[in-house]
Image: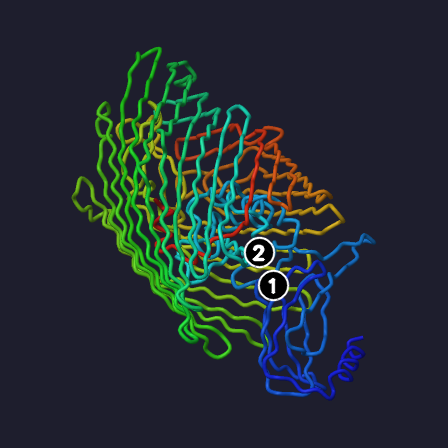
Amino acid sequence: MRNIIVSMILLFIGQMSWAQTITGVVKDTANSPISYATVVLYSLPDTTYVSGAITNREGQFKLTAVESKQLLLQVSSIGYKTRYLPAITDQTIVLEQDVVSIDEVVVKGTRPISRLISGGVQINVANTVLSGIGTGNDVLKRIPMITGDNGRFKVFGRGDARVYINNREVRDPSELDKLNSADIERVEVISDPGARYDATVAAVINIQTAQKPGEGFSFNARSSFYTGENNDYINQISTNYRKEGLDVFANLYYSNISSLLKGDISQIVDVDTLWCQNSYTNGGMRSNALNGTVGVNYEISENHYIGLRYDIKTSPQKNTKDIYLTSDIYADGVLYDKWKNRELKRTANRPVSQVNLYYAGQLGNLSVDFNADYYCGGTDTEGMHVEMSEEFGERTLYSASHIDNSLLAGKLQLAYPIGKGKLSVGSEYVDISRNDEYSNKDLPGFTSKVNVDETNLALFTEYKVLTNIGNFSIGLRYEDANYDYLVDDEVADDKSRHYRQWFPNASYATKIDKVELQLSYTSKVVRPSYRELSGNLAYGNRFMIETGYPFLKPTVRQDLSLMIVWKIVQASVRYVHQKNAIVTWIDRFESDPKVSVLTSRNLHELPKLAAMIAIAPTFGIWKPQLSCGIHKQWLDLTSYGINVRLDKPSFFGSFNNTFDLSGNFMINLDAAYNSKGHLSTSYIYKDSFLVDCSISKSFFDKSLQVKLAISDIFNQNRAVNEIMMPQTDLKNLYHFDNRALSFTVRYYFNSARSKYKGDAAGADALNRF
């Protein structure tokens, strides 16, 4: 068939000659542009390769060739039939969807289509059912390998992910709720981030939005109401104004959220006496936020951009936590005491300010990307702890904490084509300070003042090249991190640290027939949070206190992974080796052994294995997506005084269903399952099963959208774990009030997105705050 097509084209173009530049646009049958289609130019009759290109977000391409009278274009994209046609400039090329048969059921190869990219996988969203799903949050929840919600997501086998929108890190989780799914072009799930990312970044989710032409004013507004055991509210408005090279944007977000917590806690302590504490907890938290953003971008010339962005986060009212705890205490099986506790905390969030300044430009073939960030903020918390004991009477404890954070950071990245690849080099510098003061005048030894001053200098380089046998990428990052730990304004040499570390990464990707494969290796680090390093003692009850561990070492991770994409199937296998793994630990309080100290420790090593597979076919209006996987770790605590092996695997599965109905109606029914199993030093001793459902409809050419949803229909959202430590067994079962009915209205007027190209310097430090 291909020979016949080629022969017909030869007859058509045999006597014609062409200019050196060939341009065009690739679209689908719905007249929507197809981005990232492959366009290859051949000379005839021997079909010798001349040049190639990838279409941009508008489906446009541009090729350059030596003059020839016989040229042939090959245009292909996953999910579409490949076309061969004459190399005529300024033409529109329409690709038809490919259709395959599975068990005599016709399944269209419609997108979202997965394809491998350096370090991860890319999911196309534009022109798919996902584009009408609602928000950025709704889209990410339905991407294979991603779990989570409300702006906080994890990547399978890697853990917490940094979320970016157009290469700018998302600091405010509400940003994903502000993002219209129809504006998303694609989602990149980078499970093996390269050297340009901070060594602490385990995974990256980068959302790329489609560029819309036009100028003038635009805005979008959203209002949501949630009702369950509490009533919650979220309101948001975003505006944008464009005129020639000027782009001004602003948004305002307000939320008032309440949550309830119920739990059963059992703690057994075996010292000179066998102590057993059975507790029931019941209470709630209320938080509110008023966040604002203003910014400006300016296009100096075609290849030079500058911008400034200011974010402020405030809480008009104090956030509160009010928890009641009822406990029965037994000593060697005999009732020792009963008490009722109340813990009340009020936190005043001082305004958090962050300023970002960027420049992005092209100097010939040299790409330049510079970012500078300043951050400051803090909290003041007042606590009251009331204990009513049948045997020891009543007492009230008062505490207060004061936290200040500040950061100054800069990042420069340069990229230049060398040979068939591109070389990137860069540097990042971070200077941060944290002041943490805690006082409890009613308990001796519980008042402290800790300061941490940190500087971190990083140098990195990465080279990516395309060869005949596949794509190669190799990178190296060097970090020089210095921590000065001060107690009562005096440097504590035994707790201060200085690290000089190298972090290599490499990947190889190829395609065998229609199967894409990528093998990756990365070296990463997990640095302890400031809370984990803090030596401050936080009082829980007469049998439990919490503190950090200033002697924690960073965890060094070595990751080896294999990713496979074949048509509508995506799979991955990952092995992770962690040295000095940071885990939850329980020690004894030195002056009173029956009191447990909840803290953190380093384990010598913690190896893990993770594997998953996902399939996403289409059956008419029904678009299902089935994912399943397994986590397995190998951990023997015998050498730590505990005769137990924590190596039971855990399984997970999800089944998401979208029904794309006529009249702009859409129904979603999603289910997720997680089994029992070991996770670090904890045992998840109960299975969990969650089901969500929603129905939405769009009006006025999708400018207005209404959505009715029910979350956690069977009220099964809970957190369970058991921690077995030397002389201690702690068991927790918490229920949350996630079952709720919600109603959301969104309105988009001349919808547009800011062209802001800034990235965040010092990303790791900001997240650790």
Residue 375, given in percent of the width and then of the height, sits at 31, 48
The amino acid at mark 2 is: Glu
N-terminal of the two: label 1 or label 2? 1
Residue 167, given in percent of the width and then of the height, sits at 46, 57
Q: Which residue is mark 2?
A: 185
Snapshot quadrant of residue 373? bottom left
Q: Farthest residue to the left: give it.
A: 490
- Position of 726 relative to 647 (above/below): above
Q: Nearer the viewer, residue 573 or 458?
A: 458
For the point 33% across and 30% down, the residue is 347
For the point 43% across and 72% down, the residue is 423
Element type where label 2 sits in the image: strand
- Position of 413 relative to 11 (above/below): above
Residue 252, given in percent of the width and then of the height, sits at 43, 41
CB-based contact (under 8 Å), mark 1 and mark 2: yes
The amino acid at mark 1 is: Ser
Model colouring: rainbow
Number of residues whose C-alpha sits closer than 10 Å to that of mark 1, classed few (under 14), some (14–19) or many (20 or more): many
Residue 553: which numbered mark, if any? Answer: none
Residue 35: which numbered mark, if any? Answer: 1
Residue 665, given in percent of the width and then of the height, sits at 69, 41
- Position of 105 relative to 315 (above/below): below
- Position of 367 relative to 257 (above/below): below
Element type where label 1 sits in the image: loop
Q: CA distance from mark 1 to mark 2?
A: 9 Å
Numbered marks: total? 2
Q: Quadrant of the N terminus?
A: bottom right
Q: Quadrant of the C terminus?
A: top left
Q: Nearer the viewer, residue 565 or 58?
A: 58
